[in-house]
Amino acid sequence: MKIISKRPKPLLAPPQKTTQQETESSGPNIPISSELEECLTWINDTFTSCADLVERQFHIGFLQKRAAVFYFDGMIDKTLLHQHILEPLIIASRVAEPDGEEVFRDFYQWIEKSVLTSGEIKTVETFNDMAKGIIQGDLVLFIDGCEQGLVIGAKGWAARGVTEPATEMVLRGPREAFNEVMRVNTSMLRRRLKTNKLKIEARELGTMTKTNVAVAYLDGVANHELVEEVHRRLDGIKEVDSILEGGCIEQYIEDSPYSPFPQIQYTERPDKVTAALLEGRIALIVDGTPDVLIMPAVFMQFLQSSEDYYNRIWAGTMQRWIRYLGVFIAITFPSLYVAITSYHQEMLPTNLAMSIVAAREGVPFPAFVEALIMEITFELLREASIRLPNAIGNAIGIVGALVIGQAAVEAKLVAPQMVIVVAITAIGSFTVPIFEASYPIRLVRFPLMFLAAALGLYGVMIGWIALLIHMISLRSFGFPYMEPLAPLRVSGLKDVLIRAPRWQMMTKPQFVEPTEAPPHSFWQRTFLHLFRKGRKE
Amino acid sequence: MRLSKEHKIASYQLFFIVTLIFNGAYSLIMQNILGRHVKGADGILCMLGAFVLGIGVLIFVHYIGKALQNDNLISFLPKIMGKKIGKLVGFMFAFYFSYAAIFYLKCFDEMLVAELLPNTPRWILSLALLLLVLWIINNGLEDIARFYTLLGPIVITMLLAVLVANSGNFRWYNALPFGESDPSGFLSGVQAAFPIFLINITLLVVYPAVNQPQKILKVALGGMTLSAVYLMIMFLFILGVFGNVNGLKIVWPLIELSRMIRIGPFLERVEAVFILVWFSIAFLNGSFLTYCSTTSWQALFNVQKAKRFNVLVVGVLFIVSLFAKDLKAIFIMQYWFSRYVAISVVILLLLTAAAVWLQKRRRRAHE
């Protein structure tokens, strides 16, 4: 068995190590000193020129032992700091009357078990671990005379709340989307999959960014080889400096990074990720990214929307076919127009042919150049309007409509039919429910138009075959990208050609040889139930 | 579905390959060829005769294929025939696959020039198609088989559609006479039609690559029968639509049939669509035959860097194909195909089968 493995070299050269970095990351593990002054010096040396580092010194309880906490301002929850850390340590510990011997024997244990009321506490013994805690947004506590430190979980930075999906809107279905906080995202999955089989394995990527990444899968449903493969590929990017977004990881771990087609799906919808996990796929949750990566991905899944499964069967099926038609139109319509008007006019009904000829009268460009101008103009408008505020975006739309729809036609730069072709092509590309998948569709349109201009319909066919050769050769984590069409998997067609009833699709997960038996279908359950009932009677 | 890439093809994929390979370029010009030997619907009898001979070939292919196990045909031959003779026979098989590939691709080029792009130089059409073929053969047989299963159902539907759409134009009396050809004409007709079914020799190349080799015979027989039935019905249909004189002179019969189709008052001429369907078939069969050719040459010369070598082989095929400049050259190629190449290949097949039989006998005696 050969699984494509990628162990990319880091894009950026490793930075020159300074004393400060050595201490932070890969330097020797220096044990924590029992002298508080030494600890303070170490921390201050390590985090020089870090204006947001807060140091707070105080005395603990009745013993009046000197202590200090460190944290980055803005990264911790201040309420938690005051109510569950400082107040218990400074005030509540005065009234606590521990056994004196116990206090001196295991001071930290007393602090952890009897004083602090915070939920996450970890005892560490090296400066490196303390520094790591601060960097991660936790709070660290040093106590004079102790050779240990406490890392107290107090993360609480400002984050965006759970909002509606911005790019994957549905009319029917849940309206919540992931946000940038990894724990919020994992909690959304936990809330939907109430089983201990949901495994979330954490890891850290990026030598500088130390981005938290979680690999989520359903134990017993996901193929363990696939899980290992995901980890193996993630291992390959350990030395990369920064992981700023899920897209950075995607480029490193996908099978064919130079292909225009995405081989890993990203989604902002928790219900979609839940469904993917149930199918045996693996989700990658990246801290700081409001999208979750799903792998492996096949092309047909980019043309499916969550809504298809919530709507009625025929509605879901119809929506899918409309999308397929939309994709076909988005890829081929301009090139068909170019090919037919340039080479195969005989294919057109006489009246239509005459109407096109009459409309093109006075247009100085050949059909190909005309189509190219219009398509490029449309792409310019789309690119210009996509990142503008809504009000200006609408204005661009109006300008575009006027420029393309009226002025260009009246100036005889393009034929009115061309405007219709471009408009239908654009609408076709908008039917793709996942924005990521519409990029390759928009991209391949141009070479196809060129081939149509050079070789007519033969060129269009050459372009399509080249496209299919490429798509058939693609793999996503070793799985064929064009599945279930090529290779043909008849059982998979009920989720492609139609949207079969739910009970017919609850069979063996697609991406696995599961270690668990698949759930019984609706009919099996019904008949088994009747059978058992009959036997009892 | 497994995580790994196994480089094997399934028997259902083989079915699509077999079904479409018989409907390849040869059937594009078959009407005209048979029209030179027999009268009216007697061409069906010729095809039936060729089909029976094809079954015989298939049985021999299966017999040799079972002995191959996981070996390539060309590397297997020296083991049973000795190095020199084995290499020579291997060379001749590789030559046959290359000849078939060029013939199939050139037929399509010629049709394209005649029917769709009369002003485009042939070499551009050939080159475009061969570049696609080169791309997919470098991806391997698995991808070729996937392409067959992806396009196969569409192509088969279109092939049936062209007949159904013309059913209104069909007249039984146009297809007559039947049984009036003289026996010598009938025999030469069978010989002319035989290369269509001889192409199942290519199965020898895919034998080691099929997941369930025990199913190959059944699958191949099924695909071959379906194709034969389709070809016979198509033959009859063309006579029934165009008459027994004109119908036998047509060079690109399916294109002519598609030209007759009218879809309401709107769509008048849809032959371009059918030409594109033929392009799909030409691409699929061209890919498969070129794959057979390249793997055979690779095995013959014991080549390690397959992709570079494939470029060389495809380049040679392209240059050789340039010598066939027009339709006349295609008919000459067909004549050689049925007269010399087919007979030589059958002799080679029989020799190989005999060698396999001797080897088995020797092994049994040794045991």
Image (spheres, coloured by chain):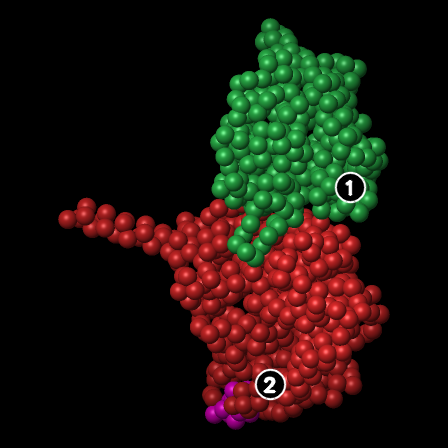
Q: Is residue B60 above or below residue A118?
A: above
Q: Is residue A90 magenta?
A: yes
The shade of chain A is red
Side (left or right) of B241 relative to A350: left
Residue placed at 19% from the left, 48% from the top?
A534
Q: Are marks 1 and 2 on the same chain?
A: no
Which chain is the one coloured green? Answer: B
Instruction: Please give left or right for residue B85 compared with residue B211 in the image.
Output: right
Q: In the image, B61: left or right of A376?
A: left
Q: Can you give x and y, in whole percent of width and height, for residue B22 in the image?
A: 61, 31
Judge depth for marks 1 and 2 and give the one in front: 1
In the depicted view, which residue is nearer to us: B303 or A428?
A428
Instruction: Name the residue: 44% across, 72% down.
Output: A173
Q: Nearer the viewer, residue A414 or A244?
A: A414
Q: Residue B111 occupies which quadrant of the picture?
A: top right
Q: Amino acid at mark 2?
A: Ala
User: Which quarter of the image is occupied by the N terminus of chain A?
Assistant: top right
Q: Main secondary structure of the magenta part?
A: helix
Q: Position of residue A198 (x, y in %)?
A: 48, 62
Dot 1 amino acid type:
Ser
Q: Which element is circle 2 on?
A: loop
Q: CA distance from mark 1 to mark 2?
A: 63 Å
- Give the residues in magenta: A84-95
Asked whether residue A213 is in view, the answer is: no
Neighbor class of circle 1 (other Cα within 10 Å; few <14, some 14-19, many 20+) is: many
> Would you identify the image quadrant in which residue A327 lies?
bottom right
Q: Which residue is mark 2?
A: A158
Residue at coordinates 50% horizontally, 61% vertically from top-left?
A320
Residue receiving disc 1: B126
Count neighbours of disc 2 (C-alpha within 10 A) and say few if under 14, some if 14 to 19, many if 20 or more: few
A516, above or below A117, in the image: above
Q: Residue at x 68, y 82 (%)?
A: A402
